[in-house]
Amino acid sequence: MIAPAASESPQPRLDRRSAAKHAAILKAATEVFLREGYTRASVDAIAEAAGVGKQTVYGHFGDKQRLFLAVVEHAKTANGVGPDDLAALVTDSGDPQADLTAAAKRLIRAVTAPEVAALNRLTIAELTHHPELQRCWRDGGGSQNLIDAVAAYLADCDRHGTLAVPDPATTARQFVLLASTEAHTRSMRGIEPLSTREINTIAKDTVSLIIRAHQPQPAIADLPPSQMN
């Protein structure tokens, strides 16, 4: 019997240790960023809190900005708005009112989740000195991915005739901004938790505006004679 090469068995343990370090760095970075802010947070402090060397932090994430963005993506994923969640943001049941209301509630809960909201507040506080953080939050898979997911659903509604949406991307942006901005405003950007009733009201009001603006027009052949002129 040929014994397995010595290099074959240790590899899974190395992978597990690497994953554990990665998770520890993300956890420590989240705590340090939220406590110190982006500018004051140092990679040395994050490495110490994670129990790893500074070079290990750089090896996993490259630099402080990329580490911060990884923290943001981790928080979003933990609250249901990560890349793997977006395709299922809107479930197509054939009822746009119900589908969009459910999506709006999920969106509101996600953007006002304590960790996500706190990181968003942090990027706003750093806007003058580090505008790239807010740009990366926006362009690196944040609101744009949400808009794309809703736009895909609205494009299907337009094709099926359940809604008339000639510009799904614009309508999706309006939907996401209406729901999230109202939620941010009412919750003071996540500082004051929204009640279930408030979440339901914001979602209902948002969807009502979108549905009313995009009701499909009946075909001329379907109109009664009194309305054809």
Image (cartoon, rainbow, N blue to C red):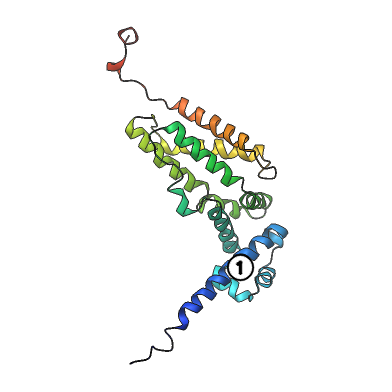
Residue highlighted by disc 1: 25
Residue 62 in sight: no
Location of residue 170 with respect to 124 vertically, above or below: above
Graded by Cα atoms within 10 Å as few (under 14), some (14 to 19) or many (20 or more), the crowding at tag 1 reads many
Could you tell me if residue 138 is visible in this image?
A: yes
Residue visible at 67% across and 40% down in the picture: 187
Res. 196 image quadrant: top right
Please tell me which residue lies in front, 148 or 2.
2
Comparing 154 with 203, the one in front is: 203
State the image coordinates of residue 125 (x, y, percent, origin top left): 69, 50
Q: Residue at x 37, y 91 (%)?
A: 3
Question: Residue at 31% across / 11% down in the picture?
Answer: 224
Quarter of the figure with the N terminus: bottom left
Check the image and report above or below for 113 versus 100. below
Give the position of the C terminus as an image quadrant.
top left
Helix or strand or loop: what does disc 1 sit on?
A: helix
Is residue 217 found left or right of 124 in the rendered image? left
- Seen in the picture, residue 229 relative to 62 is either above or below; the reply is above
